[in-house]
Amino acid sequence: MPVTAARVVKAVQKVSSAPAFARIAPHVVPALDRVVHRLTRGKVLLSAQLLPGVVLTVRGAKSGQLRRTPLACMPEEPGEGAGQEGGGSWLLIGSNFGRTGHPAWTANLLAHPDAEVSWKGEDIPVRARLLAGEERDAAWKALLTFWPPYATYQARVEREIRIFRIVRR
């Protein structure tokens, strides 16, 4: 039976939904992504081989220090969501791999919505906005189509997973 890309993605989705993955991945995946991103001068994120990814640079909510975090993202088509001409918007989801607390980067974006992302080797100034209501519902539906394990992550936690739209400044 030949291994296809679809089978690999399904297998990864199954593994990423496991509680053990949620315990291990937050420590391993970002560390590997940071190393690969640095070695390739921002052109490659290891995790982006399965999902598109950015490296978010934002000031810490408490420290004010710049924080760099590799994140999966869902790029939006031009005119979609934020209505930006020529594109330049992404959805970021604060799933924290289905762990209890919100990831720190979400608090940082709430405190400092002006940030920067590294996208395919390009550093792009962005502004973040937390989605709510119908806009969040529509984004959540799109995200579940994009990466079904997000439903498993949400089912594990009582908090509402934060979704941000980031747009070029």
Image (cartoon, rainbow, N blue to C red):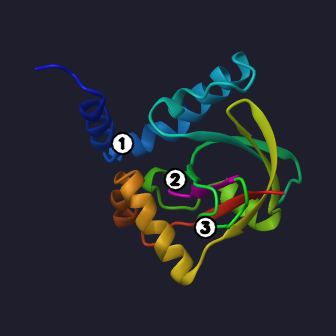
Q: Position of residue 10 (x, y in %)?
A: 27, 39
Residue at 52% over, 82% down? 134
Q: Spatial distance from mark 1 to mark 3, Cα to Cα?
A: 27 Å
**Residue 16 marker:** 1
- For the question of whether residue 82 can be seen, the reply is yes
Viewer-proximal residue among 10 and 159: 10
Cα–Cα span, label 2 and label 3? 23 Å
**Residue drawn at point x = 54 percent, y = 61 percent:** 101
- Residue type at mark 2? Asn
Q: Which residue is mark 2?
A: 96
Outermost residue to the right: 64
Name the mark on residue 81.
3
Marks 1 and 2, how far apart at CA? 12 Å
Rendered image quadrant of residue 52:
top right
In the displayed structure, 164 sits above or below 37; it is below
How many discs appear? 3
**Residue 138, relative to residue 113: is it above or below?**
below
- Tell me the quarter of the picture where residue 112 sits: bottom right
Please give the range of residues in magenta: 87-95
